[in-house]
Image: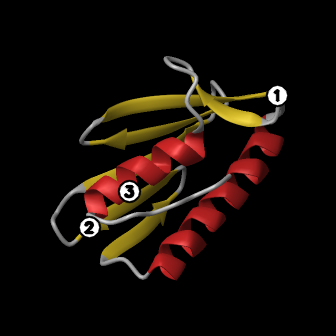
Amino acid sequence: MTESEFLTLTDGIFTRIEAALDEAELDLDCLKMGNVLEIEFDSGEKVVINRHVPNRELWIAARSGGFHFALRDGQWLAARDGKEFGATLSAVVGHAAGCDFVFAV
């Protein structure tokens, strides 16, 4: 995948994340700065989604840890345990928000 294709693909994912957060009406602030989407909750907890362009990966950083995802067979899967990006993001956002949250890529 070219850098341009990666950026276009992940721009769409960032946009869908922001839309899902808006729809969920959670108490948070969402800020996109270049390759980083930062979600800050009223509790002060943060979830940071970063697109790592050189490796063509999406990264999630949360209190529970850091996760790296690569596109394999049409799914963003974690390098460490094979978990899917949407499921991991749902879990970390739900934990930080103190309620259920579902995001599907």
Q: Are marks 2 and 3 in contact (CB under 8 Å)?
A: no
Where is 93 relative to 79, above or below?
below
Q: Secondary structure at mark 1?
A: loop
Q: Which mark is residue 41?
A: 2
Between 14 and 105, the residue placed more toward the observer is: 105
For image coordinates 16% across by 63% down, the residue present is: 44
Residue furthest left in the image: 43
Please name which of the two marks, 1 or 2, marks the residue nearer to the observer.
Answer: 1
Using a 10 Å C-alpha cutoff, classify the residue at mark 2 as few (fewer than 14 neighbours), some (14 to 19) or many (20 or more).
Answer: some
Residue named by callout 1: 73
| Image marks 1 and 2: residues in contact by CB distance under 8 Å | no
In primary-sequence order, the first of circles 1 and 3 is 1
Q: Is residue 86 left or right of residue 97?
A: right
- The quadrant holding residue 16 is bottom right
Mark 2 or mark 3, which has the lower sequence index?
2
Q: Earlier in the sequence, mark 1 or mark 2?
A: 2
Q: Which mark is residue 92?
A: none
Q: Is disc 3 placed on a helix, strand or loop?
A: helix
Q: CA distance from mark 2 to mark 3?
A: 9 Å
Query: In the rendered view, would you say 59 is above or below 93?
Result: above
**Dot 1 crowding, Cα within 10 Å, few <14, some 14–19, many 20+:** few
Residue at horizontal 26 percent and vertical 63 percent from the top: 98
The residue singled out by tag 3 in the image is 93
Q: Horizontal and vertical percent for residue 46? A: 27, 55
Amino acid type, mark 3:
Val
Establish if 39 lies above or below 90.
Answer: below
Residue at (41% x, 70% y) in the render: 30
Q: Secondary structure at mark 2?
A: strand
Q: Where residue 88 sits: x, y (%)? A: 48, 42
Q: Viewed as shown, does residue 4 lie left or right of 55?
A: right
Furthest residue in direction front, as rendered: 100
